[in-house]
Image (cartoon, helix red, strand yellow):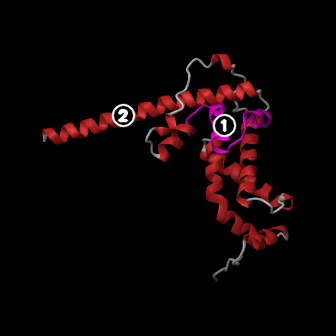
């Protein structure tokens, strides 16, 4: 027998149903946002299985805390903040956070024009996911989520200087990998051109 999912004509009606504890609304919320939220969690938890676990915990928090949503801002943004918080809690519990790194240890000044490098989005995400946990976490919070270093320091229980040093090192690492990818791509292009000329 075909089960019909109710059609909520507005987000407000969907949120209202969620606040009333309607399980059908839970299903709609999950199906609507799971893909995006898994992507958020995967940026912090490089292991997909861990990211899926964190996302599920995040949705449980969404359903438990729905009364706290005041409906004066973005619902998706509210869910996203819960997912980020759950991801950080997972990292700290798993002790996957790299602690204090002095800002003085950053010996290479990053080239802030790295973002101009032509790069595939999937390649960029792969590079970010391959960063050490501390670098990846601060990079995501600062560059993608838009938090300040003061906010990041408070969220992670580190100093503002550590947040800045982690971001600087993340940028250096990303810049290095982008240049390496660019060189590899250029070499492949030259090789293809040579083969075409020689044939």
Would you place residue 74 above or below residue 112 in this image?
Answer: below
**Residue 127: numbered disc:** none
Residue at the disc numbered 1: 137
Q: Residue 86: horizontal and vertical position, in percent?
A: 75, 46
Q: Residue 96: horizontal and vertical position, in percent?
A: 69, 33
* SS label for mark 2: helix
Write the residue at 66% across / 61% down: 33
User: Where on the picture, by quarter, is residue 20?
Assistant: bottom right
Nearer to me, 33 or 105: 105
- Residue 143 among those drawn in magenta: yes
* Magenta portion: prevailing SS class: helix
Residue at the disc numbered 2: 184
Q: Is residue 170 visible?
A: yes
The magenta segment: 129-155
Compute the Cα span from label 1 to label 2: 27 Å
Is residue 81 toward the left or the right of residue 67 in the image? Answer: left
User: Where on the picture, by quarter, is residue 100?
Assistant: top right
Would you place residue 92 above or below residue 33 in this image?
Answer: above
**Lower position in the chain sequence, tag 1 or tag 2:** 1
């Amino acid at each position: 027998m075909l089960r019909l999912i109710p059609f909520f004509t507005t987000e407000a009606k969907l949120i209202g149903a969620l606040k009333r504890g309607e399980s059908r609304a839970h299903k709609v919320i999950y199906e609507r946002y799971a893909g995006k939220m898994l992507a958020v969690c995967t940026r912090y938890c490089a292991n997909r299985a861990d990211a899926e676990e964190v996302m599920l915990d995040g949705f449980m928090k969404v359903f438990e805390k729905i009364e706290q949503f005041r409906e004066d801002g973005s619902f998706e943004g509210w869910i996203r903040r819960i997912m980020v918080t759950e991801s950080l809690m997972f990292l700290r519990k798993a002790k996957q956070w790299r602690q204090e790194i002095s800002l003085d240890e950053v010996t290479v000044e990053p080239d802030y024009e790295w973002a101009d490098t032509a790069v595939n989005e999937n390649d960029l995400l792969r590079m970010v996911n391959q960063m050490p946990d501390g670098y990846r976490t601060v990079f995501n919070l600062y560059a993608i989520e838009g938090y300040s270093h003061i906010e990041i320091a408070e969220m992670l229980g580190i100093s503002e200087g550590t947040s800045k040093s982690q971001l600087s090192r993340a940028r250096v690492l990303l810049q290095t990998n982008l240049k390496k990818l660019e060189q590899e791509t250029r070499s492949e292009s030259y090789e293809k051109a040579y083969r075409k000329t020689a044939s």
